[in-house]
Image: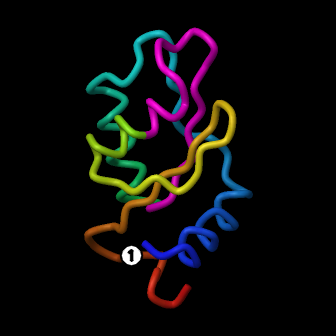
Amino acid sequence: MTTKQRAALRSMANTLEPILHIGKDGINDNLVKQAWDALEARELIKATVLQNAPLSAREACDELCERVHADPVQVIGSKFVIYRKARKNSKIDLDAL
């Protein structure tokens, strides 16, 4: 992903609300499934790491990206944004960004 593409995705993410909330259980199989399904439907998602989580937003972003085969877009404070192109019916054309 190019710097220009990442900047465009960050801009798109400004209006997103977090749909994943990572708490005391960290990144478990249920959260991975939720992220996988959300990425397939939306491609770009925002997550938040709650205060009681056992890991930082950077650590959560890296682990979740690895487990769902996504690309990190941005980490700010307790929130992060990740992107994965949908296998079918992609809504975001990175080549056009």
Q: How is the image coloured?
A: rainbow
> From the image, which quarter does the N terminus lie in?
bottom left
Q: Name, please, the residue furthest toward the right.
A: 15
Question: Splitting the image into 4 quarters, where does residue 29 fall?
Answer: top left
Image position of 87 (left or right of 96)? left
Task: State yes or no: residue 59 in magenta.
Answer: yes
Q: Residue tagged by mark 1?
A: 90
Image position of 23 (left or right of 66)? right
SS at mark 1 in the image: loop
Task: State yes or no: residue 11 in magenta.
Answer: no
Give, as a single range, the part of the protein colored magenta. 43-61
Percent coordinates x, y for residue 25 in the rendering: 41, 12
Percent coordinates x, y for residue 66 in the rendering: 29, 43
Q: Is residue 6 above or below residue 55?
A: below
Number of numbered markers: 1
> From the image, which quarter does the C terminus lie in?
bottom right
What residue sits 69% from the left and 66% below the top?
A: 11
Percent coordinates x, y for residue 16 in the rendering: 67, 53
Indicate the amino acid at tag 1.
Answer: Ser
Question: Splitting the image into 4 quarters, where does residue 61 fall?
Answer: top left
Q: Is residue 76 above or below residue 8?
A: above
Q: Name, please, the residue furthest toward the front.
A: 3
What residue sits 32% from the left and 46% below the top?
A: 36
Q: Is residue 43 above or below residue 4?
A: above
Percent coordinates x, y for residue 35 in the rendering: 39, 42
Closer-to-camera residue (9/38): 9
What is the crowding at mark 1: few (fewer than 14 residues within 10 Å), some, or many (at least 20)? Answer: some
What residue sits 45% from the left and 88% below the top?
A: 95
Image position of 28 (left or right of 41)? left
